[in-house]
Image (cartoon, rainbow, N blue to C red):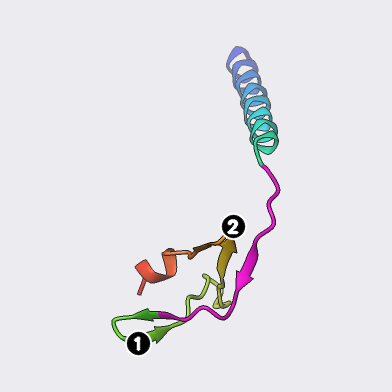
Amino acid sequence: MKNKKWILTAGVFGMVLTGSAGVYAGTQLETIKAYLNHGLGIEVNGQKFTPTGDKGKNLASITYQGSTYCRFVPLQMR
């Protein structure tokens, strides 16, 4: 019985801790305005490359304040 109470207490404490971490992370986020750049061509080893997500959807580069950002995970998996 004592062991069950300890497990229940630890579970509740864990839920409270993870819930509060999510709330804290949400307050640190800032909304920005960026553009998806579908016209940017990417070349890998001299061949045209179109990055895709894990479900096969084409991924576009992001342009924000004059800088372009690309996801490199699809390039690493190639």
Q: Which mark is residue 65?
A: 2
Label 1, secondary structure: give it: strand
**Residue 27 location, x and y as percent?**
70, 34
Q: CB atoms at circles 1 and 2 under 8 Å apart?
A: no
The magenta stretch spans which residues?
30-42
Q: Main secondary structure of the magenta part?
A: loop
Q: Name the amino acid, label 2.
A: Gln
The residue singled out by tag 1 in the image is: 47
2 to the left or right of 45: right
75 to the left or right of 62: left
**Up-down: is 71 above or below 23?**
below
* Viewer-nearest of discs 1 and 2: 2
Instruction: Give residue 75's quadrant in the image.
Output: bottom left
Residue at the image position 60 percent from the left and 16 percent from the top: 6
The disc, 1 or 2, on the residue closer to the chain's N-terminal end is 1
**Up-down: is 46 above or below 67?**
below
Asked if the magenta segment contains residue 45, the reply would be no
Q: Nearer the viewer, residue 53 or 10?
A: 53
